[in-house]
Amino acid sequence: MAPNVAKPIIKVAALSGSLRKGSYHRGLIRAAIQLSQESVKDIQIEYIDIEQLPMLNTDLEGPGTFPPVVEAFRQKIKEADSVLFASPEYNFSIAAPLKNAIDWASRPPNAWANKAAAIISTGGGGGGELAQYHLRQVGVFLDLHFINKPLFTLKAFEPPAKFDKDGNLVSEEAKEKLKEVLLALHEFTLRVQGK
């Protein structure tokens, strides 16, 4: 019988494309953090706030330097083993704040390169499917490697309620699906890292 070998702990940077305090996407990240503390023990998730990032403007860069808030954000991405994007869909695409954060971290040297990633989305219509597809396209240029399955889209406005009044995920079915995403992200991150 093989000995129980502990899985390596991976560090996940979690970003929400929605800046609204009660956003369902922030609620998905809070649920992911809770799951990582309760049942997906091999993952440490840190929510990275992108609200304070200035709009991308290369005039703000110096020779090899960035504004302090941008540099701190880029450092968090560099330190992470993988990324969890909570991406709302606006006009069939990703939200402007998320795209802005992606663009800042892609400035040379690209902080996203060779990282595993997963996307979770919620909303109306398709639950964010088109935004996920667009984010995957952006990821190709950034050398981000997304898990293919499970796909996590959640139709937030169809009964039964998926979130409470504060934007917290209350659907046990959705939490189970989110747990599957985190487990897949862990496994895929180790594969990308060659472990």
Image: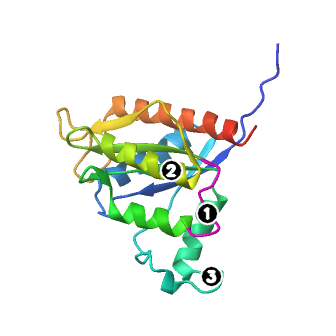
Please state the extent of the stretch shown in magenta in the rendering: 107-115
Question: Which numbered circle lies on residue 65?
Answer: 3
Q: CA distance from mark 2 to mark 3?
A: 24 Å
Q: Quadrant of residue 171?
A: top left
Circle 1 residue = 110
Please report whichever mark, 2 or 1, sits nearer to the chain's N-terminal start: 1
Q: Is residue 162 visible?
A: yes
Question: Which is more N-terminal, label 3 or label 2?
Answer: 3
| Residue 185 location (% of width, % of height) | 56, 38
Q: Nearer the viewer, mark 2 or mark 3?
A: 2
Q: Mark 2: which amino acid?
A: Gly
Q: Amino acid at mark 1?
A: Asn
Q: Is residue 88 above or below residue 127?
A: below
SS at circle 3 = loop
Q: Kindly identify which numbered label has been placed on residue 192.
A: none
From the viewer's perspective, is residue 55 above or below residue 136? below
Q: CA distance from mark 1 to mark 3?
A: 13 Å
